[in-house]
Amino acid sequence: MKQIISEVARKCRAEMQEVEIMPDHIHLVVEVDPQYGIHRLVRQMKGVSSHILRQEFQHLRTRLPTLWTNSYFVATVGGAPLAILKQYVENQKNV
């Protein structure tokens, strides 16, 4: 999953700062051009990852109606130090 979303980010000219994969969601710290839009990046990540994972893992085609919901949460970080954000995302696997 990390490889898939990292490749999508690269193609969309977004910079992945940190990623943590949870069983039912993903935490990302990503820098994306405001002209491109975070909504477009999220849509690409969900669409591409769903397509690839359903091709690779046959049981995902029939077991679930969709791999992703239409929902996502985005927050801007302003002046927060990048190291603190990375630490927060990294610590999510321990929660």
Image (spheres, rainbow, N blue to C red):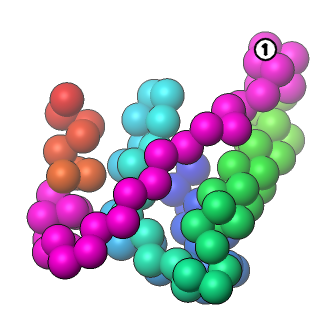
Relative to 41, residue 19 above or below? above
Q: Quadrant of the C terminus?
A: top left
Numbered marks: total: 1
Rendered location of residue 62, percent (x, y): 86, 17
Q: Residue shown at 64%/85% (left/top)?
A: 35
Rendered location of residue 67, percent (x, y): 71, 31
Residue 53 placement, left or right of 55: left
Residue 18 placement, left or right of 11: left
| Residue that numbered label 1 is attached to | 63
Q: Is residue 85 visible?
A: yes
Q: Residue shown at 43%/70% (left/top)?
A: 30
What is the crowding at mark 1: few (fewer than 14 residues within 10 Å), some, or many (at least 20)?
few
Rendered location of residue 15, percent (x, y): 47, 80
Q: Residue shown at 55%/43% (left/top)?
A: 72
Write the start and end of the magenta stretch as one range: 59-87
**Is residue 4 rendered magenta in the image?**
no
Q: Quadrant of residue 85?
A: bottom left
Residue 15 placement, left or right of 60: left
Q: Is residue 52 visible?
A: no
